[in-house]
Image (cartoon, coloured by chain):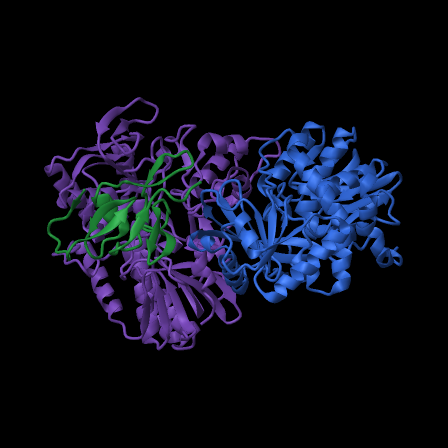
Chain colours: A green, B blue, C purple
Amino acid sequence: MARVADTARGVAAEIMVDGERVSFHPGETIAAAMLAAGHAAFRRDRHDRPRGLWCNMGTCCECLVLIERDGEARRVRACLVDAAPGQCVTTRDGAA
Amino acid sequence: MDAADVLIIGGGLIGCAAAWHLARAGTDVLLVERGELNAGASGQNAGSLHFQIERRFLEHGEALADQAARTVALSRLAIAEWRDLPAALGDDRLDVAMQGGLMVAQSDDEVRLLERKAALEARWGLPTELIDGAQARAIAPYLADDVRAASFLADEGHANPRLVTRALADAAASAGARLRPRTALRALVPAPGGWRATLRRGTADVEVAAAAVLIAAGAWTMAVGALAGVHLPVFPIGLQMNVTERVAPFLPHLVQHVGRRLSMKQAHDGNVLIGGGWPSRLARGEGGFDLARAPMVLPDSLTGNLAVAAATVPRVGALNLIRTWTGVVAITADQLPLAGAVPGRPGLFVIAGGSGFTLGPTLARVVSAEMLGRSAGDAAAAMALVAPARFAHLNAMLA
Amino acid sequence: MSEPCYDLAIVGGGPAGQAAAEQAVAAGLTVVMLDEQARMGGQILRQPPLGMTVPRWLDGRGYRALKRQLARAEALPGLTWSGRTSVAGVLREAAGFALIAVPTDGAPGRRIAARRLLVAAGCYDLPVPLPGWTLPGVMSAGAIQAFVKSQRLVPGERFVLAGTHPLQLILADQIVAAGGEVAALLFAQAPAAAAGALAHHAGSALRHAGPLAAAAASYVRLRRAGVPIRFGRTVLAVEGSDEVVAARVGVPGEAGEVIACDRVGLCFGFLPQADLPRSLGATARWVERTGGWATVADAWQRGDVPGLYVAGETTGVAGAPAALEEGRIAGIAVARDAGRIDAAAAERAVAEPRRRLARLRGFAALLDAVADPRAVVTRLASDDTIVCRCEDVTRAQLLAAAGGVAAPSDASALKLVTRAGMGLCQGRGCEAAVLRLLAERTGVAPAAIGGFTPRFPVRPVPIASVGGADCH
């Protein structure tokens, strides 16, 4: 997992993923920030096995996470939503 | 020429349940279904087991509400039926959950409507409990802060429409009933000793003689009745329903709304089902409604239903909608079920109309008993209310 | 704040949508374009975020014409761009279409009215069920490529790529150029099969030396970089408990060898994104090689639903240059049908795009033949392999349900019994595999069986966002 060195990025900030700090650069999706930090699991399946992102284009819905911002909770696809300062991401809430 | 004691038209919940009851009583049953088993309203409905008087009966004046209240006797039977069904079928996969249901009110008018409803229910012996908003939230902490009152009925709940009909079909087949999906009824005429039907399977026509026929064809009841030369006044209605992604259990009850169209529960798999009688648009064909095509989703029903859901149980607002589907149900002119012998047509029986999932297993059992010449027992009074005899005037002049 | 009823709504900001928008705006029509990505471009030109500066971004020759087109489309005056927006579904209304549009971050949605609709929604990677493919770290080729192209992230350290599609040569090349390691690049087809397909289409291959040259150049660079490229081999299983740690690689039916890696990319072809036209009742055609449903279009890119147009991979996967031509034709057709240009002018305008399109489709047919995944994709799943990722339905469960008394004979009935296809993705992930399995079981061709009944919404959207999507 490496950010490609030739690219100029803005100043890094942080989101929380399952209670851990994860750093991101402006414009990165939640999925990119998580993978860059080594978080490959985005949810647990019905048998509590970890699942990863598959398509990275909004089609497979494997990367659905819970985000909370300003008291509003939403389940969104991590590959489509930008990381933003103050965002809390939970990967385990969801599948029964 | 094939033969059967009973020919059942329709492979939904009611048809399969009747096939089970009749077959295990030793009757030779042939069930035909034009499409797949459980493909109509039986599989399309949202699986509510609702026994409180429905909102639809309360919004059209006292007479209708009173009449509906008299069917409470059927609801009481249905409660026992659903409690016993998994054991009777020897099947614990039906996802039957009866942990209570709340019908909520959010405005003054709605609170008054709820009180009127509870009084009716009390008169006919349904143990509904009227509680205030705080009491409701004590039972159901997920309810919105502005819920002012609720009526609670401990027996309400839900079951899985995907599984119930399948289990009934399996039980019927084990008891010896012959189930024939993808077999269409082409003709149904009286014959000496009963009825003669022409069935089409693939490209071949088959004749079947049956002593008795049960029409359990849902929205197609009127069309099947026409084949038999009888008016069965059951009208198709397009509804739409919604379901969220699976989430951990948080909503153990059936939630309904007395003033707005809402019915909500969390299924065994974790999905939250949201409906409540919101219309979809029936497809139109050359001769009228085209029931072969799925009704269209209406945008106002979609946004309206989901807005009510999120206003009543705020937590569902965060969950993803994953499917909205439409289905066709059948209701009679007076909104009560149509179940029993068809007058003037010996050997012809029908079960259709209104609350088919909740009441279906009960109606199928009682009408099967009637077909076997047995007494309806404590269901007799309620069955008189829903008997086809009340529409006999429509058929008095039909040859 | 009231949003007008648009003359045309375009779903998809890729080459097809851009080209159509250019034509429609030029004809004086009001146009809104919706896409889930923040910026226009589609998957082929998935742009880096505005906050990143990338030197020499996608500077290969094959991207040049597409980049010129993108620059023109982004500068179009009068085109309403609605990025980061999911089209949950399109419903029919008296005046045309109602689009339920919801921001990807779950903010309140809106209802957009449009007289005409162009669906140019692109394609997605063919999901290939094989043991271990649900482990974190197994991704589609498109997923990995989008991270490299757009997010400028190499989403792993050591990759094994497997498939039948030549795109994986270009992907491997991009991974290596970005600093990643490709431990193995596997083509399931035997070299003889690929060569045979090329020979069979030899005329076409010669005419399309350009696009093939890009793949050939990648091949040479990868060889030079020491990347092992092997034919007649594929990933048989992926191993690991929390994440990928290795791929078992070899010939189907044999034990294979284990290669350590932390990422596996699968590249067996692409399926049309056609949920919206299907949900509107447009006729679709089963794609034999990859599976999936391509929307049927007439010579003006019209679907057989009034007011509906389709262009690009939604009509069958033929590559970005073909998509661009189809989009151009669709835009001209919309202008014509809206009475903005006359029939003769429209005929003149589409003549050249149609000529180019015919040539490009020839190349697509060649690529399809070379990349044909059928011989391998049905042989990889074992009984306990998950076919429906959303609902955890295995191949064995599907086989059992399809074999019972009064067993379901169509995909929707099987879905009701097993839950396969009932999950978040609406069946996009498993439909092709489920249909193949049913076909195997019943002896009826997938096209005759029919797919899952398409349902609203085509993307998951929060309840509160849809509930808030009343008319403004």
Give left or right: position of B129 versus C85. right
In front of the other: C184 or C212:
C184
Rendering quarter of residue A84: bottom left
Give the left or right position of residue B139, taking residue B358 as reference: left
Q: Is residue A76 left or right of residue B312?
A: left
Q: Residue at x 78, y 30 (%)?
A: B25
Q: Position of residue C244 (x, y in %)?
A: 27, 33
- Point out residue C270 in the picture as x, y percentages from the top left corner: 34, 46
Question: x%, y% of residue B368?
Answer: 78, 38
Residue C152 in sight from this viewpoint: yes
| Left or right, B161 with reference to A38 | right
Quarter holding the C terminus of chain B?
bottom right
**Depth order, front residue of B364/A48:** A48
Q: How many marks?
A: 0
Query: Which residue shows up at 27% across the image and 57% down it?
Result: C321
Nearest the viewer among A15 and C456 is: A15
Rendered image quadrant of residue C387: top left
Relative to residue B218, is residue C90 depicted above or below?
below
- Identity of the residue furthest to the top in this view: C255
